[in-house]
Image: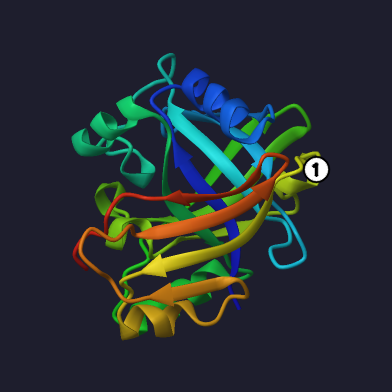
Amino acid sequence: MLQLDHLVIAAATLADGAAWCERVFGITPATGGKHAFMGTHNLLFSVACARFPNAYAEIIAIDPGGTAPAGPRWFGLDAPALRLALRGGPQLIHWVARSHDLHATSAAWRASGIEPGAVVAAERHTANGMLRWQIALRAGGARPLGGALPTLIEWGAVHPCDALPVSGVQLDCVQLIGLDEPCLGALGSINGVACAEPTDSAPALVATLTGQRGTLALSSLPTDPRP
């Protein structure tokens, strides 16, 4: 059984991401930390509710003071088209699904013809100590179907939401566009996550959130062809 873990919002810089969050939601995101092995860093805010327990939004950017990785960064952050799009402001680009047995879920996806990526161990320092997890990373930092097909993650003993304050923003629903039958079968049923057929210029995913400034739908870039 998979659960929605977090939304991935890319920004050209973390300063851009913080300003966007304050402007759009009226909140200041919490400091996340640095991903040294990826040369990225992030900010976080909770979007948890009864439908999506332990869900949060991650604002992620390339760390200008970090060391560039040997290969492409995760979530396609090195892609020229994405970097160009982020000049216009932060962008919802992806989502991450939580598994309680990442290796088993990855094997099941491969059996269905869906490549989840190689499982790698990751960690980052936080104000509350070391945070550790395993994540399945696809070659080249790919986000299949424009990010509609999630990245898989398995957390260790501590989850980021354990230290996140209530933000006043809640995730209402997520709509995925353009998943075919094998993808739908691999993903299964997740409460609050719906699927729709693609149309011309349809976004890959839409996340609807409600906060003190009302309800807002964040849309990603148009869908990519299935690899």
Residue that protrudes farthest toward the top in the picture: 65
At x 72% / y 54%, what residue is drawn? 48
- State whether residue 132 is above or below residue 16: below
Q: Quadrant of residue 11?
A: top left
Residue type, label 1: Val
Q: Is residue 200 left or right of residue 212?
A: left
Q: Position of residue 129 (x, y in %)?
A: 75, 33
Q: How many marks?
A: 1
Observer-nearest of 68 and 82: 82
Q: How is the image coloured?
A: rainbow
Name which residue lies at 43% across and 62% down.
Answer: 150
Question: Residue 96 location in percent, x, y?
Answer: 51, 57
Please report the residue visible at 71 percent of the width from the left and 68 percent of the height from the top.
Answer: 51
Q: Quadrant of the N terminus?
A: bottom right
Q: Nearer the viewer, residue 191 or 79?
A: 191
In the rendered image, residue 19, in percent from the top left (x then y), is placed at 55, 22
Instruction: Tell me: residue 155, above or below residue 21.
Output: below
Q: Looking at the image, which residue is at 73% across and 61% down?
A: 53
Q: Is residue 60 left or right of residue 115?
A: right
Disc 1 target residue: 166
Question: Which one is in front, 38 or 60?
Answer: 60
Relative to 85, 166 lies left or right: right
218 and 189: which is toward the camera: 218
